[in-house]
Amino acid sequence: MKVLAIDSSNYCMGVSIMVDGTVVGELITNIKKNHSVRLMPAVEQLLEEVQVKPADLDRIVVAKGPGSYTGLRIGISIAKTLAWTLSKPLVGVSSLEVLAQNGRYFSGAIVPFFDARRGQVYMSVYKANGIEVERETEDQIVLFEEWLQENKDRYERFLFISGDLTMHKEGIKAILGDKAVFAPSSSLNARPADLARLGASHEPVEDVHQFTPNYVRMAEAEAKWLASQKK
């Protein structure tokens, strides 16, 4: 099976290609540049380098959120277009599930998260079972300090994984103390290779045209519009 995986759901952008269970190519950048002008050239470059023709792909996998609204729309639009034009199945995988894979050897609560502004984060909790990572909670948006207070006695140890870790690290330590463990800098961003691996086993999307990002909450503009209609 030849799998193309695309992730532009957050600041970090990644593309990978897996052939029969082997990751043959992976490209990751963590720089402030526009995904909209860089993602498709990155896909084309990687396909060419590993000598996989688009028509030979067996499925397209994309990180479906939560994350940046703009980033999600870019990645999912490209993935849907490729899946439709090439007549290939499309698979969506939680962006948090992909990030959680970096904690697969941790004994305790694995907490991947993305900053959502105003003291909020997108997060979920996972537990490692051998080298597999199993979901404990659904993807959600929470006031992070409240969640930490409510759950500080639920687990003995917490592993926090996030490219936004520096924004929340002191607040986490203040509430959890020694229970808090922080992933090293090399493990703070999701790996597109893990996205490809997960997508190879997930069920494909039935209707490519109806597939939408998992924002977890409405975009701010949409929320304001709905509120204005109620007046």
Image (spheres, rainbow, N blue to C red):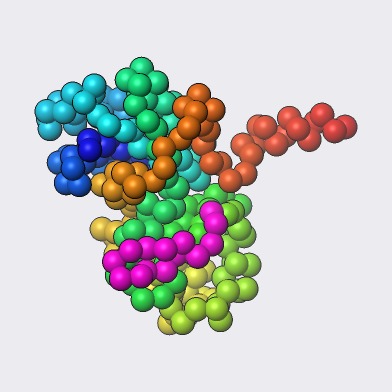
The quarter in which the N terminus is drawn is: top left
- Residue at figure coordinates x 59%, y 54% from the top left: 141
Q: What are the residue bounds of the magenta stretch?
A: 126-139
Residue 176 visible in the picture: yes
- Residue at figure coordinates x 23%, y 23% from the top left: 54
Q: Position of residue 144 (x, y in %)?
A: 57, 62
* 40 relative to 173 in the view: left or right: left
The quarter in which the C terminus is drawn is: top right
Residue 165 visible in the picture: no
Q: Position of residue 137 (x, y in %)?
A: 54, 62
- Residue at figure coordinates x 38%, y 73% from the top left: 181
Q: Nearer the viewer, residue 136 or 142?
A: 136
- Residue at figure coordinates x 18%, y 23% from the top left: 53
Give the vertical position of 18 relative to 110 (above or below).
above
Q: Nearer the viewer, residue 120 or 58?
A: 58
Name, please, the residue furthest toward the right.
Answer: 231
* 40 relative to 229 in the view: left or right: left
Q: Is residue 8 magenta?
A: no
